[in-house]
Image (tube, grey):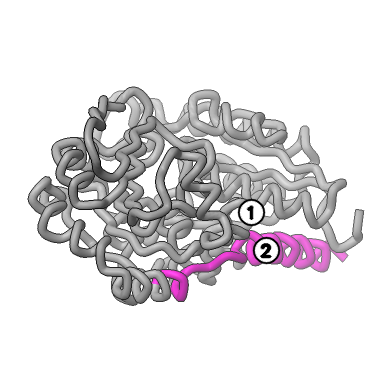
Amino acid sequence: MSADTPSSVLLAGGGTAGHVSPLLALADCLRRRDPDIVVTALGTESGLEARLVPERGYPLLTVPKVPLPRRPSADLLRLPGNLRAAVAAAEQAIEQTGAEVVVGFGGYVSTPAYLAARRRHVPVVVHEQNARPGVANRLGARMTDFVATTFASTKLTHATAIGMPLRREITQLDRVASRPEGLAHFGLEPHWPTVLVTGGSLGAQRLNTAFEARVDELRASGVQVLHLTGAGKEFEVTTGGPGAPYVVAPYADRMDLAYAAADLVVARAGANTVCELTAVGLPAVYVPLPIGNGEQRFNAADVVAAGGGLLVEDSALTPAWIDTTLVPLVSDRDRLDAMAAASAATGERGADELLADMVLAAYAKSLAGRR
């Protein structure tokens, strides 16, 4: 263990893949740099982290979930007591692991982690994945100089834009070299242009409905599709007669191979999705989720402005749009190549290393302050 490296780090985040994925990418990076470092995740029992963190080989400690009500309710009355319990659990996690830095990725878990770290005089690092920061990270950013954002447009105190920490299988992907393997893996054919349709792990009803209505037309147009519907949302495809393949699956364990097979992606505009697609240089049609605070529209703003993607309103993603816009686009090789180059120019493959550097800098500043 180097004197410049903390012996133990606590990574707080969970609930959604958007919080868990960068957490795991940083954990892997810290472990690559120093195999002896103790990396522990702090999450809840009900979020995706409860499955994903142990699967990746890291210990998970939990805190009670503390919803932040947006309007008067019984949850609002219970908030002070719930928050105290969660902060106490986060303090216990810091003590149990001997954590010398706490890194928060936002969400329910990060607020108690930040408050516990301040009470324990443990340095804090914040990473905000969305273009619009959440409540937890706005709080955390006031407690530290070490604040990282995915997007340069994000308004957050002390922020430095570094991009999104991503999995190595994505950041090291060579799409051209891996294309034959990707096509074979999904039962696709090399002589057709390929559209990847994905709404993430939960799927996107708008995308599923529109594309299901155009299976025959896409096949007849010579456009093959890999459609990831989300678990339990698959549909049957009848593939009699000539035409391009249309492959339906609930999800892909090998998204790197799905990206390698694709020429164009139609997807929601979650921060992790946008950052993965730009890291691998894929042109995309981004269809922001029409609910929430609108952050998905902002997540895709930079790559769309650069020409690496199109932004299509959820209500405009119709079967007719597929006919009039998608089919001509995926059939235009020159335009796809130009979009791919623009997408890659906005992508960042090294954010995990940059965030690890920030963790070490926070630790070094803390050490210097104690001397």
Classify 71 as above or below 182. Answer: above
SS at mark 2?
helix
In front of the other: label 2 or label 1?
A: 1
Q: Which residue is mark 1?
A: 168
Q: Residue at x 28, y 58 (%)?
A: 285
Local crowd size for mark 2, using a 10 Å CA cut-off: few (<14), some (14–19), many (≥20):
some
- Farthest residue, direction front: 242
Question: Percent from the top left, x then y, of residue 355?
Answer: 64, 62
Q: Is residue 251 left or right of residue 197?
A: right
Q: Are marks 2 and 1 in contact (CB under 8 Å)?
A: no
Q: Is residue 271 left or right of residue 370?
A: left
State the predominant SS element of the stretch in magenta.
helix
Q: How many marks?
A: 2
- Quadrant of residue 99 within the rendered picture: top right
Question: Percent from the top left, x then y, of residue 107?
Answer: 46, 43
Q: Is residue 271 visible?
A: yes
Q: Is residue 84 left or right of residue 57?
A: left
Classify 302 as above or below 293. Answer: below
- Quarter of the C terminus within the rendering: bottom right
Q: Residue at x 31, y 66 (%)?
A: 309
| Residues in magenta, as a range | 343-371
Viewer-proximal residue, 41 or 89? 41
Q: Which residue is mark 2?
A: 353
Q: Which amino acid, mark 1?
A: Arg
Question: Percent from the top left, x then y, of residue 237?
Answer: 25, 29
SS at mark 1?
helix
Local crowd size for mark 1, using a 10 Å CA cut-off: few (<14), some (14–19), many (≥20):
some
Q: Which circle's residue, 2 or 1, is located before the other in the chain?
A: 1
Question: Percent from the top left, x then y, of residue 325?
Answer: 15, 60
